[in-house]
Amino acid sequence: MEPGLLFFGCFFLLLCLGVPIVTSIGLTALIFLWQFNLGIQVTAANVYANIAKFPLLAIPFFILAGFVMDRAGLSRGLVNLLNLLIGPVPGGLGLVAIGGCVFFGAISGTGPADTAAIGAVMIPAMVRRGYAVGFAAALVAAAATTDVLIPPSVAFVVYGVITEASIGRLFAAGVVPGLLMGLALVAPTVWIARRHGWGGERWGTWAEIRRAAWDAKWGLMAPVVILGGIYGGVFTPTEAAVVAVAYGLVVGLAVYRNLGWRDLYETFRDAAVSTSVVMVVVAFAGLFSWAGSTMGIMDRAAAALVGFSTNPVVILLLLNVMLVVAGMLLDAISIYYVFLPILLPLMKQFGWDPVWFGVMMTVNLAIGTITPPVAVNLYVASHISGAPMTEISRWAMPFVVALVAVLLLVTYVPALSLWLPNALGVR
């Protein structure tokens, strides 16, 4: 039998048997390294090499920054300001949730962190105003998908490491698609809210808005410091992650003074657990990719895709369908390591810009965070709201449709992704 079919068949069989994703990836790689005598003795060195890369240092620091800024309460000031600005329009609190997630995405680097930070504030507020709890949870989870695109983004760091694309250009390229994703969620939110008679609160007075803006100034300044430093050439994206942590600690300890020793311990503990999960996946997914490439499986898979059609429009549509389905089954980092060795030859053959391709692929993976069974944002929202996954998944469907529309735009209009990095001259 074709080794490629055996290789991927073994992986998906383990998944179907309920084996955790990281175990399925690592075990498949080890079995085939041993069976085909590909040098299983180099496993330890290979695993270490996958994670011992300087740009990957940004992952633990951006994750820690998200936890620190959440505990420091930066999201609450932003949400209060948006609430006063949006007022009692149909779906007003839903629009506040979308705006809060988009803005917090410029502070945090992961969708689950965004879901937790904004969801803890907005889901109870929406429920008190009469919104269905499943709708509130689904909306926050969907809005948090923008965090994967809007810089700083942990996903772009991983993609940049694998493809050797500029992480700075990837960060800039994700801004416009990320904002489009947020805007796309507005239409279904307003439509559903009108049908159910859900509104917002009241308009804020000028005095209240000025006071709320002053209270939210530290949250508003965070993206300016982090992203301004990157594009101003003050520090690299990896160094920006350290700056983000330092900024959050200064605000929490010296300005708000709401981070005690117990809070710091819990923050660092939770960040360490989240980081360890990500880095273990990176280590073993890299081993899986290396084993497949060494056996020639990835090259044959790429050739098979090209053999299906030479029309780039058809190929891109096929890739999007494949990645959306993969996003339902795997986490984003695993998908990068499993599929990019197959897709890199296609990118070269068709002359596709790796930065645009990375944005397109990442939009797919962002949608995967709200499409079961592996829908991490929905799980976080379910934990916060107490609503069952089945109910949240049903409410999430209109938001999935809206995000797929953005995906098609990003896919077939590359200028949406490349305009900003080109305009900024980011290298």
Image (spheres, grey):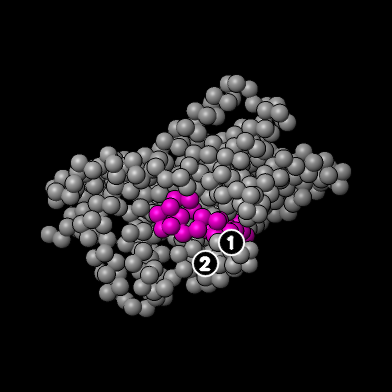
- Above or below, 410 against 143 in this view is below
What's the mark number on residue 218? none
Q: CA distance from mark 1 to mark 2?
A: 20 Å
Residue for badge 2: 410
Q: Position of residue 318 (x, y in %)?
A: 37, 68
Residue for badge 1: 426
The residue sitting at 30% across, 73% down in the picture is 306
The reply to whether dot 1 and dot 2 touch (C-beta < 8 Å) is no
- Above or below, 170 against 67 in this view is below
The residue sitting at 81% across, 45% down in the picture is 209
Residue type at mark 2 is: Val
Task: Please indicate, yes or no, whether residue 18 appears anywhere in the rendered image.
Answer: no
Q: Residue 422 sits in which quadrant?
A: bottom right
- Above or below, 235 against 307 in this view is above
Element at label 2: helix
For the record, the magenta segment spans: 156-184
Residue type at mark 1 is: Val
The residue sitting at 18% across, 55% down in the picture is 6
- 167 magenta-colored: yes
In the depicted view, which residue is nearer to us: 161 or 251? 161
Local packing at callout 1 (Cα closer than 10 Å; few below 14, some 14-19, many 20+) is some
